[in-house]
Image (cartoon, rainbow, N blue to C red):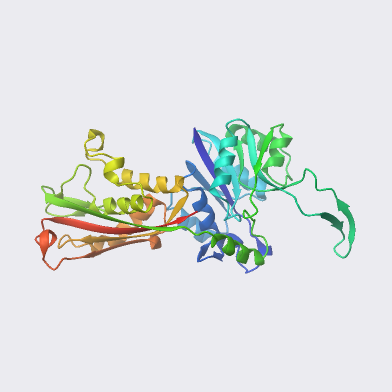
Amino acid sequence: MSTAAIIVAAGRGQRAGGGTPKQWRALGGRRVADWTLDRFRGRVDHIVLVLSPEDTDAWQEFRASNLILAEGGTDRAGSVRNGLLALRNHGIEKVLIHDVARPCVSNRIITDTLTALDSHPAAAPGLAVTDALWTGDGVVVTGTQDRAGLYAAQTPQGFHYDAIVAAHAAHPGGAADDVEVARAAGLSVATIPGDADNLKITRPEDFDRAERIMGTNMDVRLGNGYDVHRFGDGDHVILCGVEVPHDRGLQGHSDADVGMHAVTDAIYGALAQGDIGQHFPPSDPQWKGAASAIFLRHAVELAGRMGYRISNVDCTLVCEYPKIGPHAEAMRTEMARIMDLRSDQVSVKATTSERLGFTGRSEGIASLATACLVKS
């Protein structure tokens, strides 16, 4: 069953202050949008990012990612419709619609919303109202409101894809959210428990609250990886996903990408999930000559399923030849693409062993890697 998330990020968010749309403002050393996107990576099959035509830098940046991009509409409903249309040829059965300004959404809410769609056409998190409610004119209290049965709506709101597409097509506009659109079309919407920490950044002080939430119960993990491959016949080597001309090749059961193997094992190590050999046994002929990107992508997706995002990776290649420097930037770019990271989250560097040992004798290439994972 194919799943997707639509991240609505086309608004201008002026109430949050700062002069910059809130999704592009800094939060805990990263942008709000970066945190939000990371919440969904590895948890759904496809992610659509809906961007304003005005955000030209974001369009250029995210075109190089694994995201599907869609242009924002004149209002939120138009942006959601454009996001839904961007998924029309992807065989989507379940879709989550989420506000980019909710970067603290938990893995539990995402999972519970998707699970609820197994038995309901729509589902959304709601937070029961516990405070007394007043009416007022901005100066004095004019009355009270019974809070029984009232919920504060949150996102992501989940739907069967075909049903919500039809609901939006039939709706006249002006809905507060997608649940209202769904209900107008007669869809039953299941309520799942919301989370007080799943705040929507709206006012300037919300940034401080979001940072406090993100700093609570932080789980940071480090893993290291090490790999070696000997030289054999060939006219090139593949290192960190890049083909580098050389008078010899590297021997291995797969494509012998020693750098990518070390990074993959570093991620598995941080997760305490063994190594490449356990997930892709060399005794299995289907992996003979396989591209190492398959292994790395599996490790990244496993991290996402376990609730972790990759903060950064650092890979060191140890060899006398070939020279890595001219290719290092291409290697960083390719590794970042495979892991769906920014290039500044990936380091690829090289050193020699001063002609000592098997690498010094040019008998092969070794690689060491470290990966840092943070609980989402």
Residue shown at 64%/33% (left/top)?
166
The residue located at (33%, 48%) in the rendering is 296
Pinpoint residue 164: horizontal percent, then vertical percent. 63, 36
Count of residue discs: 0
Give percent across and percent down for residue 80.
62, 45
As drawn, 16 above or below 281 = below
Task: Tell whether 286 sits left or right of 110.
Answer: left
Residue at image position (89%, 63%) is 140
Q: Residue at x 31, y 61 (%)?
A: 329
Could one spot residue 241 in this view of the protein?
Answer: no
Residue 200 image position (x, y, % from top left)? 64, 56
Task: Identify the image quadrant of residue 15.
Answer: bottom right
**Residue 124 image-quadrant placement:** top right
Q: Nearer the viewer, residue 244 or 317?
A: 317
Single out the residue that lies furthest toward the right: 142
Q: Can residue 104 be seen in this view?
A: yes
Query: Does residue 91 appear left or right of residue 180 in this picture?
Result: left
Q: Nearer the viewer, residue 375 or 101?
A: 375
Residue 317, compared with residue 73, is above or below; it is below
Residue 270's spot in the image, x, y percent?
A: 37, 54
Along the horizontal axis of the image, is 279 left or right of 165?
left
Q: For the view shown, which residue lies furthest in the left direction?
A: 361
